[in-house]
Amino acid sequence: MTPEERDRLGTLIELYKEQCSHGRHTEAQRQAAGTLLLTAGGALIALMGALQFSIHCAPIAGLLLGLGVFGKRFMGVFEKKWEETSGRRDFYRTEIERITGTPTPNVTSSKGLLRAFWKRTFDAVVITGIVCLLLVGTVVSVRSTHQQGTLMDRILEQVSVQGKATSTPGGNPQ
């Protein structure tokens, strides 16, 4: 091996190591972002459960749906970064193997299997958001059919009940 090849090999090895490190860093970022988004989604579902899927949960369910769409797009960005890093890393490795005459080891790989799982996880978040929106609509519809009178009658009834509660002597509701 000539001194020029040795220098080039040293440079290629350092560039290869840098791309491997960058790939690990990108994967760590993807994992942290995914965990954060999934935790937020779980908190939104818990909040809707605590509110008994009332009409107030409709915006929360919409937020869950948006969170799922955002998560899918976010994972897509990390996938592109991973592919760019992998392309550079594979180029440097091929050059190192060419210079050294070392054949590529025949190792099977589950290429993209874990990343596909993460993207499908956010598909599940989107589906959960849609189901929650439908559940909120169903619960609100069922509750409204069990109540009698028009909407104005129910509002006036609530106002009169609240007015009676605050009009007791001393201002203390009974």
Image: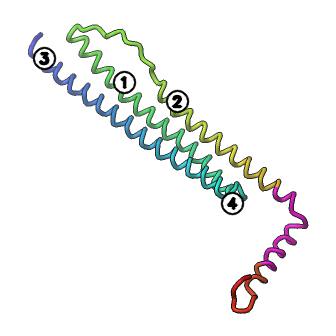
SS of the residue under disc 2: helix
Q: Which residues are magenta?
A: 143-161
Between discs 3 and 2, the one toward the N terminus:
3
Residue 79, quarter of the rendered image: top left
Quadrant housing the C terminus: bottom right
Q: Check disc 4 and give the amino acid type.
A: His
Residue 54 rendering spot, x and y as whole percentages: 72, 58
Mark 3 vs 4: CB contact within 8 A: no
Mark 2 vs 4: CB contact within 8 A: no
Q: Does the magenta portion include 158?
A: yes
Residue 23, quarter of the rendered image: top left
Q: Depth-wise, is mark 3 or mark 4 nearer the camera?
A: 4
Mark 1–mark 3 distance (CA, rounded to whole Å): 23 Å
Q: Which residue, given by chain and number where applicable, does mark 3 sit on? A: 6
The residue shown at (36%, 24%) is 87
The residue shown at (84%, 75%) is 157
Q: Which residue, given by chain and number where applicable, does mark 4 sit on? A: 56
Q: Check disc 2 and give the amino acid type.
A: Phe
Residue 110 rendering spot, x and y as whole percentages: 45, 19
Disc number at residue 70? none
Position of 125 with respect to 35 (left or right) is right
Q: Check disc 1 and give the amino acid type.
A: Gly
